[in-house]
Image: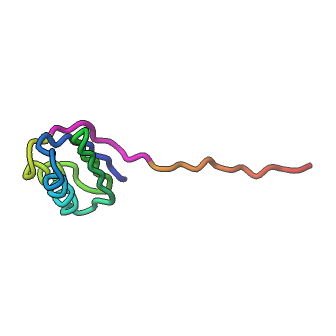
Amino acid sequence: MAQKVVMKVLTMTDEKTRQKAIQAAADVLGVDSIAADMKEQKVTVVGEMDAVAVVKKMKKVGKVDILSIGPAKEDKKPDQKPQDKK
């Protein structure tokens, strides 16, 4: 089951540290997608990975606050029931 980890990296103030944060998250096995928002200093990591491993890697970049850890939202298609025509 895919997890979504949202962290605030307090030292992510320029493009160089943003790239370091993305690279650190990409090194973890099982990561599917990474999104970094410099304005809010947030990094969102989605995938079938260990959340502890992600945070441990991100601590090498700078101070990290965990905002949320939970299941990734999956697109659920509504079940289409066949309609009987009479």
Could you say which is closer to the camera, residue 19 or residue 25? 19
The answer to whether residue 60 is above or below residue 7 is: below
Residue drawn at x 18%, y 53% as measured from the top left: 15
Residue drawn at x 13%, y 52% as measured from the top left: 17
Could you say which is closer to the camera, residue 71 or residue 10? 10
Residue drawn at x 20%, y 38% as measured from the top left: 66
Q: Where does residue 81 sit, x and y in percent of width and height?
A: 72, 49
For this orientation, the residue located farthest to the right is 86
Quadrant of the rendered structure where residue 9 is? top left
| Residue 31 among magenta residues | no
The answer to whether residue 85 is above or below residue 39 is: below
Count the marks: 0
The answer to whether residue 27 is above or below residue 83 is: below
| Residue 66 among magenta residues | yes
Q: Where does residue 21 sit, x and y in percent of width and height?
A: 17, 54
The answer to whether residue 24 is above or below residue 13 is: below
Please identify the dominant SS of the magenta region.
strand
Q: Which color scheme did the rendering employ for the protein? A: rainbow
Is residue 74 left or right of 67 when viewed as pictured? right
Could you say which is closer to the camera, residue 83 or residue 14? 14
The range drawn in magenta is: 65-73
